[in-house]
Image: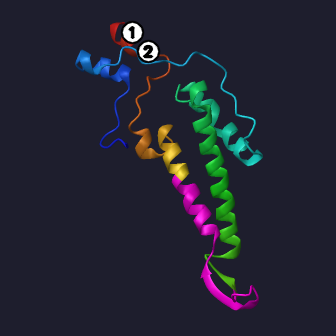
Amino acid sequence: MARTGRPSKPTNLKVLHGDRKDRINTDEPQPAAAEVAPPDWLGDAALEIWDAYADDLEAKRVLTAWDVEAFANWCDAVARRRDAAEHVEEEGAVVELPVYNKNGELTGHRRGKNPWLMALDAADAQVQRYGARFGLTPSDRAQLKIPNEGEGQGAERLLS
């Protein structure tokens, strides 16, 4: 079942805001400090995107070892989106498509929507969906709360 409404606040933010104790997950799992490395299946174009974003996201504690697959999916979707956009740019949004009869013989051509537009739309949707998880759009970034560099973490920062 899909969740509806506003996304849940992170647990440490609930603590800082003084939410009711019964609404705070005190047993929330936390990823161990581990190396964040791209998976082997990531293609060259997607690897370039990984290299451009991963270090900064990891430094801001948005990307952890647990998030590698989701972030790799985002990188792959961005690479596929760029590829589809290049094809549409070269070929145009409307192209000549072959028309065949019931025997499979070419009978002519018709103008139609470029099939690369479907790939572009699908990749766009994935880029938006996965990018939102990492705050990679301005509206999604506005939802994230990350302490400024040099400040303490969570409640310790408030007590100092």
- Mark 2 → mark 1, Cα distance in angstroms: 6 Å
In the image, 133 versus 100, the foreground residue is: 100
Image quadrant containing the C terminus: top left
Q: Position of residue 40 (x, y in %)?
A: 75, 35
- Residue 109, placed above or below residue 121: below
Q: What is the magenta range?
A: 100-125
Magenta run includes residue 33: no
In the image, 51 versus 79, the foreground residue is: 79
Which residue sits at x=57%, y=15%? 32
Q: Position of residue 72 (x, y in %)?
A: 64, 39
Residue 153 is tagged as: 2
Which residue sits at x=59%, y=38%? 71
Residue type pointed to by label 2 = Gln
According to the picture, the residue beneath numbered tag 1 turns out to be 156
Which residue sits at x=53%, y=25%? 61
- Residue 98, placed above or below residue 14: below
Q: Is residue 119 visible?
A: yes
